[in-house]
Amino acid sequence: MLSKKTRYAIKALVVMGKNFGNEPMQISRIAAEEHIPKKFLEQILLDLRNAGLLYSKKGAGGGYSLIKDPKEIVLAQVLRITGGPIALLPCVSLNFYQRCEECMNEETCGIRDVFMEVRNASLKILTETSIADVIERENTLSDSKTVI
C-alpha cells in the first residue's frame, strides 16, 4: 500500500507537471488544489527538491517547479524518495534488502519466488510510467467521462 506521503508527492508532481514551463507554484495553491495538508506538503516538496526533482524560488512569484520534464520523472523514483522499497517483502527488495528472519533458505522459498515476480512486474510498470503518463491518463479518463 502506498503511504500518504507517496500519494501526496505524486499528486503534487502531477499538478506541477501540468504547470511545467510556467511560473513556480506556491505551496498553498498546490495544497488547496489537491487537498493536502500544507505543513505535510512542505516536507514532501523539500524531500523532492533535495532529490533533484524540484526547483524552489523564494520571494514574490516564488514557489516550486519541476527541474525535469514530466516525461523524465518516473513513479519508481518518486516511491523510492518518499516511501522506501517497492517490494512487498524485504528479502526481494533491490535497494532495501533484508533477510527474512523466518526463512530457512531463500533460494528454495516459494513465497519469496512469488513476491520476486510481483516486484519485477511492479518495477517494470513503475519505471515505465512517468508523471506525464499519469497526466495523460487523467486527461483520457476525463475525456471519456464527458463523452456520452
Image (cartoon, helix red, strand yellow):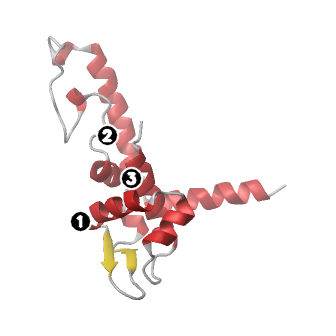
Q: CA distance from mark 3 to mark 1?
A: 17 Å
Question: What amino acid is at disc 2?
Answer: Ile
Tag nearer the camera, 3 or 1: 1
Rendered location of residue 139, percent (x, y): 63, 61
Point 80% across, 58% down: residue: 147
Residue behind mark 2: 86
Dividing the picture into quadrants, the one containing residue 116 is top left
**Residue 71 higher or lower than 57, as above or below:** above
111 up-or-down from 78: above or below: above
* Amino acid at pointer 3: Leu
Task: Give the mark, 1 or 2, whose residue is nearer the N terminus.
Answer: 1
**Closer mark to the observer between disc 1 and disc 2:** 1
Q: Earlier in the sequence, mark 3 or mark 2?
A: 3
Q: Are marks 3 and 2 in contact (CB under 8 Å)?
A: no
Give me the disc on residue 23: none
Q: Nearer the viewer, residue 104 or 23?
A: 23
For residue 67, what is the image quadrant? bottom left
Q: Residue at x 28, y 67 (%)?
A: 49
Q: Secondary structure at mark 3?
A: helix
The disc label shown at residue 75, or none: 3
Q: Residue at x 30, y 34 (%)?
A: 87
- Left or right for 55, reference 134: left
From the top left corner, tell me how far across and down residue 6 is, in percent.
39, 49
On screen, residue 38 versus residue 105, left or right, reads: right
Residue 77 in the image: state x and y as whole percent.
Answer: 31, 54
User: Of the residues under marks 3 and 1, which one precedes in the sequence?
Assistant: 1
Marks 3 and 2, how far apart in space? 10 Å
Front in this rendered view, residue 109 or 8: 8
Amino acid at circle 1: Asn
**Quadrant for the N terminus in the image:** top left
Task: Say what secondary structure mark 2 lies in.
Answer: loop
Q: Which residue is mark 1?
A: 50
